[in-house]
Image (cartoon, rainbow, N blue to C red):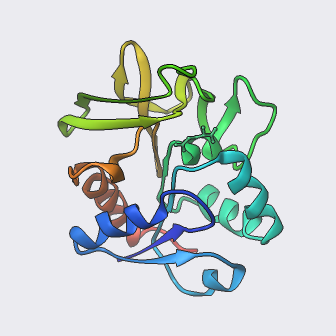
């Protein structure tokens, strides 16, 4: 199994470290020719969704990655990655990949609560640590999207088919369970998916 980690901006190295701890190979996607290498899943890290969205387009990575996501390649978006996958961002006119049936709210916790740590239940895993940094939350899910975790009544993790998103940063804690969950999604899809 090979996972491509979008490495334009933000917390991508931490994802690579998590994957290596669960013995999953990964490589960085920085430019178009990196897409020539075969990969079975994609991680879109936290950072700034506007910056990543702009770089994706400028580097001509946007369309080929969107095609793969729509075709069913497993993708895991954390924080800014969640915003890039959302069909709608309540307080931002921009739509990026627009692939997932969720409405997100950007910088949703305001300045004071912009960054915080908590522990909460993640469906199918149990209680896990969650670190939020100027995080979005998911205001609503629709279609076939399932809620996987909520904190204080706000949805912070969801899955729709091949797409997994978390408003928090599992790569910033030691708990490997969300990366294992994603690796299982990738291995389940591996035989069925053709790029
Ligand atoms: N606030 C960022 C955005 O709007 C997301 C923050 C993060 O990824 N840690 O894109």
* Residue sitting farthest toward the left: 126
Residue pictured at 66% horizontal, 46% vertical: 49
Q: How many marks?
A: 0
Q: Is residue 11 above or below residue 192?
A: above
In the rendered image, residue 108, in percent from the top left (x then y), is placed at: 57, 23
Q: Position of residue 61 (x, y in %)?
A: 72, 69
144 vs 25: above or below? above
The residue shown at (61%, 45%) is 85
In this rendered view, identify the residue nearer to me: 158 or 47: 47
Q: Residue at x 47, y 21 (%)?
A: 113
**Is residue 64 or residue 120 the one in the foreground?**
120
Foreground of the two, 122 or 59: 59
Q: Residue furthest top?
A: 153
- Which of the image's four quarters has the N terminus? bottom left
For the point 70% across and 23% down, which residue is it?
90
Instruction: Give the image quadrant in which the ligand numbered 1 is located.
Output: top right
Q: Would residue 1 appear left or right of 44 to someone viewing this image?
A: left
Residue 63 image offset from top left, x and y in percent: 76, 64
Residue extending furthest toward the front:
112
* Among the 4 quarters of the image, the one containing residue 70: bottom right
Residue 157 in percent (x, y) is at 41, 34
Residue 10 lies left or right of residue 180; in this view the side is: right
Q: Which of the 4 image quarters holds residue 44?
A: bottom right
Horizontally, is 29 left or right of 125 in the view? right
Position of the C terminus, as image quadrant, is bottom right
Is 74 placed left or right of 85 in the picture?
A: left
Viewer-nearest residue: 52 or 195: 52
């Amino acid at each position: 199994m090979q996972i491509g980690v979008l490495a334009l901006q933000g917390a991508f190295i931490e994802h690579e470290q998590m994957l290596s701890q669960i013995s999953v190979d990964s490589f960085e996607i920085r430019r178009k020719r990196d897409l020539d290498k075969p990969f079975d899943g994609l991680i879109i890290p936290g950072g700034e969704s506007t910056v990543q969205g702009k770089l994706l387009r400028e580097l001509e990575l946007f369309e080929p990655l969107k095609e793969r996501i729509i075709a069913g390649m497993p993708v895991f978006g954390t924080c800014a990655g969640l915003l890039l996958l959302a069909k709608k961002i309540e307080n931002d006119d921009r739509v990026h990949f627009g692939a997932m049936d969720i409405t997100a709210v950007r910088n949703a916790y305001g300045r004071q609560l912009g960054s915080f740590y908590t522990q909460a239940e993640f469906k199918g895993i149990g209680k896990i640590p969650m670190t939020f940094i100027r995080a979005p939350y998911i205001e609503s899910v629709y279609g076939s999207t399932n809620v996987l975790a909520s904190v204080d009544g706000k949805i912070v993790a969801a899955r729709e088919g091949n797409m997994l998103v978390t408003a928090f940063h599992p790569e910033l804690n030691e708990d490997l369970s969300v990366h294992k969950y994603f690796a299982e999604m990738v291995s389940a899809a591996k035989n069925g998916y053709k790029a």
